[in-house]
Image (cartoon, rainbow, N blue to C red):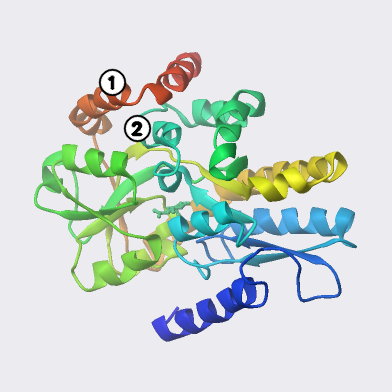
Amino acid sequence: MKLWKRLMAGVAAIGLACGLTGCSGLDSITGGKRIIRIAHAQSEEHPEHIGMLKFKEIIEEKLGDKYEVQIFPNELLGSAQKAIELTQTGAIDFVVAGTANVETFADSYEIFSMPYLFTSQDAYREVMNDTEYMQKLYNSTDESGFRVLTWFDAGTRNFYSTKPIHSPDDLKGQKIRVQQSPASVNMVKAFGAAASPMSFGEVYTAIQQGVINGAENNELALTNNKHGEVAKYFSYDQHQMIPDVLIGNTKFLDSLSDEEYDIFMEAAQAATEVELEEWQKAVLEAKEYAQNEQGVEFIDVDVQAFRDKVVMVQQDMLEENPNIVEMYEHIQQVNKKYE
Ligand code: GCU
């Protein structure tokens, strides 16, 4: 989206979210219904948006006399970190964001930024779909004003750049955008590149203007976010699987009756089911489009060579952050089942 259009849309959206309600997140502009505001950073074609439409459908079908759900895509209410803050303070009610953006709010979420944490997609999905196990982590931020309700698959993260990357050596001297995540900054440095943290919405222009050489993400970043127009080499080094999560304002969630709360949880679960199904299709489509329409070259690399570079990053993280150790061990057990 052009910058001015983005700004105008953002101003209008924030006006709606804050101006009319004094940013309290309470009361609304339509006939006595409480407006539920949800922010996310993806386009309207993205599996997460489709998942959140399911969330909206269920809430409005079952509680439509009381609630209206409004979804703000494309970082309209600000970058992921900004939107988490808005959710934390109750200016909006929900945000979908990557756990890398949550780690500065709650360091136990750092676990998912650990490079090569999951050794297969099956292990990743099994861990994340174990809602009972995840509850402890999800509820651990209640005192900070937010709680996670569910997760979304955001695929496997890989490097892509204006210059081909065949081995870790090719990263030397390259400036790579990372999420605003200290763990990801350390990881990229360990690979030998310079790390440039910035919000998702800034990446396209930064590559186009040569401020950075590339970034790292799943295949959809090439198409949904158009990065494939400016970065033509995508290397399958598979360094991270970082989930996105649906985060709600604790006060709002606690204000719901038991029955309402169950419906919100049911809607969140349904959103995940829709998203997981859409995700597989979306990755295949994105790859095909990137290859055929954008001229992106997909490069298979020796993953072990990349893994070797960041062994110390894993160890340092475990030593420095006791809050991630238990989950790390749990994930190792699940990994073993699929090796
Ligand atoms: C993916 C992920 C987002 C994340 C983004 C990024 O799109 O789904 O949650 O914010 O990457 O790299 O910033």
Query: Where is mark 1, residue-wise?
Result: 319
Residues tagged 1 and 2 counted as in contact (Cβ below 8 A): no
Q: Position of residue 212 (x, y in %)?
A: 20, 62
- Secondary structure under tag 2 reads loop
Q: Is residue 104 visible?
A: yes
- Image quadrant of residue 289? bottom left
Is 274 left, or right, of 329 in this rendering?
Answer: right
Q: Position of residue 111 (x, y in %)?
A: 41, 31
In the rendered image, the quadrant that contains the C terminus is top left
Q: Position of residue 237 (x, y in %)?
A: 29, 39
Q: Residues within 10 Å of mark 2 (few under 14, many from 20)?
A: many
The structure residue drawn at horizontal position 43% and vertical position 16%, both measured from the top left corner, is 329
Query: Where is mark 2, residue-wise?
Result: 114
Nearest the viewer among 58 and 235 is: 58
* Rendered view: 27 above or below 214: below
- Image quadrant of residue 16? bottom right
- Secondary structure under tag 1 reads helix
* Rendered view: 59 above or below 103: below
Q: Amino acid at mark 2?
A: Met
Ranked by sequence position, the earlier of labels 1 and 2 is: 2
The structure residue drawn at horizontal position 38% and vertical position 28%, both measured from the top left corner, is 117
